[in-house]
Amino acid sequence: MFIFTAKIRKGRIAAVAAAAAVVCVVLLAAAGLSGGRGTAASAAVSPKGVRTNEDRVAYLESYGWAVSAQPIAVEELIIPEAFDETYSQYLELQASQGFDLTDYCGKRVKRYTYEITNYPTGEAGIQAGLLIYKNTVIGGDVLSPQLGGFIHGLQMPE
């Protein structure tokens, strides 16, 4: 067994502690500033651990959406084993948001649909849908169910 001793003055200990505190404050301030400058997608709540209705609403709110308190529809779907051409645009939409539905081929998922109450154009009846697999958001979209409607990702249009 070896024993080492060192003589350290109280002034040096205080200086090191003060420097460490300054570094921590600077890092926290930088994290707070960069969090405010990102896009809505970067500020989004993690897609993992989305277990409850409150979690799903908070996930959508993290993109800037105000939605109905409860889903207007809950559906159970099976992601196809193989995707044909009719799915290609939807797969591209999901991929542009960082979701890869091909990882879930053959899996049973739930789609929760909420009504958006703050769509930028003021249009009513716009819906936000989340695809959930084992408490993880694996896809999502915003759409107008009207004839000639639209569909886009969860990101709020500018």
Image (cartoon, grey):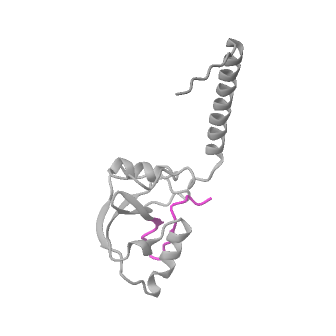
Q: Main secondary structure of the magenta part?
A: loop
Q: Position of residue 61 (x, y in %)?
A: 47, 50
* Closer to the camera in the image, 140 or 68: 140
Q: Does the magenta segment cover residue 70?
A: no
Provide the residue span drawn in magenta: 140-158
Q: Position of residue 129 (x, y in %)?
A: 41, 63
Note whether 153 is above or below 13 in the view shown. Answer: below
Identity of the residue drawn at 45% across and 64% down: 140
Left or right: 30, with 48 as reference point: right
Identity of the residue drawn at 38% across and 72% down: 104
In the displayed orientation, state which residue is furthest to the top: 10
Identity of the residue drawn at 55% across and 49% down: 43
Note whether 44 is above or below 82 in the view shown. Answer: above
Note whether 101 is above or below 83 in the view shown. Answer: above
Q: Position of residue 80 (x, y in %)?
A: 36, 80
The answer to which image quadrant residue 120 occupies is bottom right
Q: Quadrant of the C terminus?
A: bottom right
Identity of the residue drawn at 56% across and 27% down: 2
